[in-house]
Protein backbone atom coordinates (compact mmCIF):
# COMPACT_ATOMS: atom_id res chain seq x y z
CA UNK A 1 0.00 0.00 0.00
CA UNK A 2 1.39 3.33 -0.97
CA UNK A 3 0.31 6.88 -0.23
CA UNK A 4 0.02 9.85 -2.62
CA UNK A 5 3.72 10.77 -2.41
CA UNK A 6 4.70 7.19 -3.12
CA UNK A 7 2.45 7.04 -6.16
CA UNK A 8 3.63 10.45 -7.36
CA UNK A 9 7.26 9.38 -7.01
CA UNK A 10 6.58 6.10 -8.81
CA UNK A 11 4.65 8.00 -11.48
CA UNK A 12 7.46 10.50 -12.02
CA UNK A 13 9.99 7.67 -12.37
CA UNK A 14 7.91 5.69 -14.89
CA UNK A 15 7.01 8.93 -16.67
CA UNK A 16 10.69 9.82 -17.04
CA UNK A 17 11.47 6.35 -18.38
CA UNK A 18 8.67 6.69 -20.96
CA UNK A 19 9.69 10.22 -21.92
CA UNK A 20 13.36 9.30 -22.41
CA UNK A 21 12.64 6.04 -24.22
CA UNK A 22 10.08 7.40 -26.67
CA UNK A 23 11.97 10.65 -27.26
CA UNK A 24 14.97 8.50 -28.18
CA UNK A 25 12.92 6.11 -30.38
CA UNK A 26 10.57 8.72 -31.94
CA UNK A 27 10.66 12.45 -31.14
CA UNK A 28 10.24 14.89 -28.24
CA UNK A 29 6.48 15.34 -28.84
CA UNK A 30 5.90 11.60 -28.58
CA UNK A 31 8.14 11.48 -25.51
CA UNK A 32 6.16 14.20 -23.76
CA UNK A 33 2.77 12.63 -24.59
CA UNK A 34 3.83 9.17 -23.42
CA UNK A 35 5.46 10.57 -20.28
CA UNK A 36 2.36 12.61 -19.46
CA UNK A 37 0.15 9.59 -20.10
CA UNK A 38 2.23 7.41 -17.77
CA UNK A 39 2.16 10.05 -15.00
CA UNK A 40 -1.57 10.70 -15.34
CA UNK A 41 -2.46 7.03 -15.20
CA UNK A 42 -0.07 6.27 -12.36
CA UNK A 43 -2.38 8.45 -10.26
CA UNK A 44 -5.63 7.41 -11.95
CA UNK A 45 -6.52 4.26 -9.92
CA UNK A 46 -7.04 6.33 -6.76
CA UNK A 47 -9.79 8.24 -8.56
CA UNK A 48 -12.07 5.77 -6.78
CA UNK A 49 -11.54 7.47 -3.40
CA UNK A 50 -11.41 11.07 -2.18
CA UNK A 51 -7.69 11.76 -2.47
CA UNK A 52 -5.01 14.11 -3.82
CA UNK A 53 -4.86 11.90 -6.90
CA UNK A 54 -8.59 12.30 -7.48
CA UNK A 55 -8.38 16.10 -7.26
CA UNK A 56 -5.34 16.37 -9.56
CA UNK A 57 -6.55 13.92 -12.21
CA UNK A 58 -10.08 15.39 -12.16
CA UNK A 59 -8.65 18.91 -12.59
CA UNK A 60 -6.53 17.82 -15.57
CA UNK A 61 -9.40 15.94 -17.22
CA UNK A 62 -11.84 18.80 -16.55
CA UNK A 63 -9.39 21.21 -18.20
CA UNK A 64 -9.39 18.85 -21.19
CA UNK A 65 -13.21 18.93 -21.31
CA UNK A 66 -13.17 22.74 -21.21
CA UNK A 67 -10.58 22.76 -24.01
CA UNK A 68 -12.78 20.47 -26.14
CA UNK A 69 -15.91 22.52 -25.47
CA UNK A 70 -14.18 25.87 -26.05
CA UNK A 71 -12.70 24.68 -29.34
CA UNK A 72 -15.95 23.07 -30.55
CA UNK A 73 -14.61 19.53 -30.70
CA UNK A 74 -16.94 16.63 -31.42
CA UNK A 75 -18.96 15.81 -28.28
CA UNK A 76 -17.66 12.25 -28.38
CA UNK A 77 -14.25 13.41 -27.09
CA UNK A 78 -15.90 15.24 -24.21
CA UNK A 79 -17.93 12.12 -23.42
CA UNK A 80 -14.76 9.98 -23.36
CA UNK A 81 -13.14 12.31 -20.83
CA UNK A 82 -16.33 12.52 -18.77
CA UNK A 83 -16.42 8.75 -18.70
CA UNK A 84 -12.85 8.68 -17.35
CA UNK A 85 -13.90 11.00 -14.52
CA UNK A 86 -17.17 9.30 -13.59
CA UNK A 87 -16.35 5.62 -14.07
CA UNK A 88 -14.04 5.17 -11.03
CA UNK A 89 -16.56 6.81 -8.71
CA UNK A 90 -19.10 4.08 -9.46
CA UNK A 91 -17.03 1.31 -7.88
CA UNK A 92 -15.62 0.71 -4.43
CA UNK A 93 -12.06 1.66 -3.50
CA UNK A 94 -9.56 -0.87 -4.83
CA UNK A 95 -12.33 -2.51 -6.83
CA UNK A 96 -12.26 -2.77 -10.60
CA UNK A 97 -10.41 0.55 -10.90
CA UNK A 98 -7.43 -1.23 -9.33
CA UNK A 99 -7.56 -4.21 -11.69
CA UNK A 100 -5.19 -5.30 -14.41
CA UNK A 101 -7.98 -5.73 -16.95
CA UNK A 102 -9.31 -2.20 -16.40
CA UNK A 103 -5.99 -0.88 -17.71
CA UNK A 104 -6.75 -2.36 -21.13
CA UNK A 105 -10.18 -0.74 -21.23
CA UNK A 106 -8.60 2.60 -20.29
CA UNK A 107 -6.23 2.18 -23.26
CA UNK A 108 -9.17 2.17 -25.66
CA UNK A 109 -10.72 5.28 -24.08
CA UNK A 110 -7.39 7.11 -23.97
CA UNK A 111 -6.67 6.34 -27.64
CA UNK A 112 -10.12 7.76 -28.41
CA UNK A 113 -9.21 10.97 -26.59
CA UNK A 114 -5.77 11.22 -28.21
CA UNK A 115 -7.41 10.83 -31.62
CA UNK A 116 -8.79 14.36 -31.08
CA UNK A 117 -5.25 15.66 -31.50
CA UNK A 118 -3.69 13.39 -34.10
CA UNK A 119 -4.46 10.41 -36.27
CA UNK A 120 -4.17 7.18 -34.34
CA UNK A 121 -2.82 4.16 -36.17
CA UNK A 122 -3.55 1.10 -34.04
CA UNK A 123 -0.70 -0.85 -35.69
CA UNK A 124 1.99 1.62 -34.68
CA UNK A 125 0.58 3.74 -31.86
CA UNK A 126 0.58 0.95 -29.27
CA UNK A 127 3.28 2.99 -27.52
CA UNK A 128 0.52 5.07 -25.90
CA UNK A 129 -0.93 1.85 -24.52
CA UNK A 130 2.51 0.88 -23.21
CA UNK A 131 2.81 4.30 -21.53
CA UNK A 132 -0.66 4.07 -19.99
CA UNK A 133 -0.25 0.49 -18.77
CA UNK A 134 3.22 1.15 -17.37
CA UNK A 135 1.88 4.06 -15.31
CA UNK A 136 -1.31 2.29 -14.30
CA UNK A 137 0.42 -0.93 -13.33
CA UNK A 138 3.12 0.98 -11.45
CA UNK A 139 0.31 2.19 -9.21
CA UNK A 140 -0.99 -1.37 -8.74
CA UNK A 141 2.50 -2.65 -7.95
CA UNK A 142 3.01 0.10 -5.37
CA UNK A 143 -0.36 -0.78 -3.85
CA UNK A 144 0.64 -4.47 -4.05
CA UNK A 145 -2.94 -5.06 -4.97
CA UNK A 146 -3.00 -7.16 -8.12
CA UNK A 147 -6.42 -8.20 -9.23
CA UNK A 148 -7.35 -9.68 -12.58
CA UNK A 149 -10.90 -8.34 -12.59
ZN1 LIG B 1 -4.38 2.84 -5.18
Image (cartoon, rainbow, N blue to C red):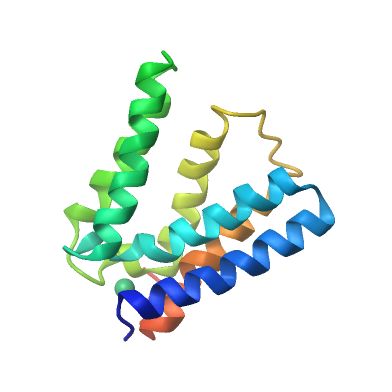
**Closest to the observer, 1 or 8:** 8
Q: Does 53 sit above or below residue 77?
A: below
In x, y percent, where is residue 45?
Answer: 34, 64
Quadrant including the C terminus: bottom left
**Closest to the observer, 107 or 58:** 58
Q: Does 2 sit above or below residue 15?
A: below
Q: Quadrant of residue 65?
A: top left
Any part of residue 49 in sight: yes
Residue 134 lies left or right of residue 92; in this view the side is right
In x, y percent, where is residue 106?
Answer: 45, 51
Residue that appears at 41% across and 24% down: 68
Residue that appears at 46% across and 42% down: 109
Q: Quadrant of residue 122?
A: top right
In x, y percent, where is residue 71?
Answer: 43, 16
Residue that appears at 76% across and 55% down: 23
Any part of residue 146 in sight: no
Residue 93 lies left or right of residue 13; in this view the side is left
Residue that appears at 52% across and 69% down: 12
Amino acid sequence: MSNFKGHLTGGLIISSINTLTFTYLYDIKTGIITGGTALLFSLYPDMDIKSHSQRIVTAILTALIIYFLYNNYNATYTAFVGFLIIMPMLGKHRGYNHSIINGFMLCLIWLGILSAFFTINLDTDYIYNIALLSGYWTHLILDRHWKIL
